[in-house]
Structure formats: structure tokens, C-alpha cells
Amino acid sequence: MGRKHVRTAMKFMGIIALYPKPRTTVANKMHQKYPYLLSEFKNEKNQVIIEQANKVWSTDITYIKLEKGFAYLAAIIDWNTKKILSWKLSNTMDVSLTTGVLKEALALYPKPDILNTDQGSQYTANEHIQILVDHNISISMDAKGRSIDNIVIERFWRTLKYEDVYLQHYNTIKEADIGIGKFITYYNSRRLHSAIDYNTPNEFYYRAINNLDSDQVLQKVA
């Protein structure tokens, strides 16, 4: 039975989940919002196509349900190669979560031209914006209520949850941190991705930024 069939049956029978689903996007009306810059990269099918690595990074926060309560996961993904560049799991959803992930990615990889986020207060906060300004990175934000504008990270969240989180049922944040770390390593280095010609994200990314041949790429990601 497919998920849509289950969802329809649950709706018909009035069955809903007992746990609350926390909001991860809470805007601050006092903060400046920035326009969505990725429309210029849309094709005739209205899909955003980024043709080179480190052109656009995408970042977001999602919640991870634990046995008791929730943890919050932030990550940065390269739009072109689908590589997860940095991530962090926390029991709080403050600006230190997003700035920590951003600083780590910038320390490890060449900076992007554009960083795309939602309009959550963590991303519009002065601390986060200033890092982007200091690195001369253009700021792009989803339109309000348009999570599809950040589709590449949303698809990764779905992959992570269906292939790992929902199957593992993590009890504690420590367990989740270890397990998610293992999955992201697998995702980057072993999991073949149809959107990048059935390469792994690591293979596709390092080939793109270093112009490496296949043997050199395999040595790099090993």
C-alpha cells in the first residue's frame, strides 16, 4: 500500500499523529527579507537547474523526532552535486545552529556565489547575514510558504528520514548524531544519485571542483 493511500485512509478514519510537529520556519518581522534569486536558473519545466558546483548552496533546518522530544538538524547542500557540505544536530534551534554549519562549510570548501534559505529568523538574523556579506555571497530566500523553492535540501530531508531516521527510531540526541553522521557519510560517498548520472555526490563534487579523473576521485573520497 502506498503512502498516499495510507494518508487518504487515515484522513477518512480521522486518524492523526499524537505528537506535535514543531515549526522550523518562524519569521522575525523586524528582520530584512531578501528576494529569491534562483528563478533565473529555471528551465522550461520550471525546474531550477544549477550547472556547476559551488554556484548555489542550499540550507535548511528540519526536526528529528526522538523517543522523547525532538532534535533539530541543519545542513548545507551543494545544489549542483547534491553533496552535503556540513551539518549539525542540536537540541535548540537558535542562530548558533545555522551560523555554525555555515562557518564549517566555508572553512572546508570554496564559497558559493549564492546561498539560498527560507525566511526563518535564524537565516535573517544579523549574525548569519553578516557572514554572507563578509564573504561576498549573494543572499537568496524562498518566497513565503514556498518550501519548493529550496527543493534540493527538501529532497535530502526526505531521503534521510525515509532511509534512516524513520527506520532507526533514535532514542537520544547522541544516538541520532552518530546514526545521522553515518548516513550522511554513506550518502556522500556510496549512495548513487540519479540526478547526477548515478555518481555519488562526492565523486561528482570533487571531479567538478578539481577537474580530477575517475581514479583520482576515488582516492579523494576513500
Image (cartoon, rainbow, N blue to C red):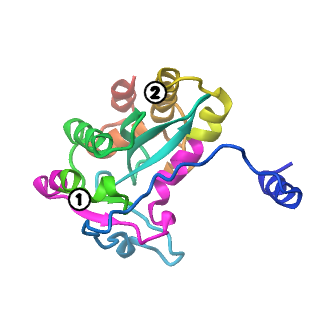
Q: Nearer the viewer, residue 221 or 182?
A: 182
Label 1, residues with CA under 10 Å away: few <14, some 14-19, many ≥20 = some
The x and y percentages for residue 141 are 34, 65
At x 46%, y 74%, the residue is 43
At x 84%, y 57%, the residue is 14
Residue 75's disc is: none
Most frequent secondary structure within the magenta stretch: helix
Residue located farthest toward the left when viewing the structure as drawn: 134
Q: Nearer the viewer, residue 59 or 109?
A: 59
**What residue type is disc 1 on?**
Asp
Quarter the C terminus occupies: top left
| Quadrant position of residue 108 | top left
Q: Up-down: is 154 above or below 169?
A: below
Q: Nearer the viewer, mark 2 or mark 1?
A: 2
At x 39%, y 38%, the residue is 92
Residue 5: within the magenta?
A: no
Residue interval drawn in magenta: 130-159
The x and y percentages for residue 20 are 62, 47
**SS under mark 1:** loop
Residue located farthest toward the bottom when viewing the structure as drawn: 44
The x and y percentages for residue 78 are 37, 49
**SS under mark 2:** helix
Give the residue number, with chain letter if any, for mark 2: 181
| Quadrant position of residue 65 | top right
At x 71%, y 44%, the residue is 18
Give the residue number, with chain letter if any, for mark 1: 113
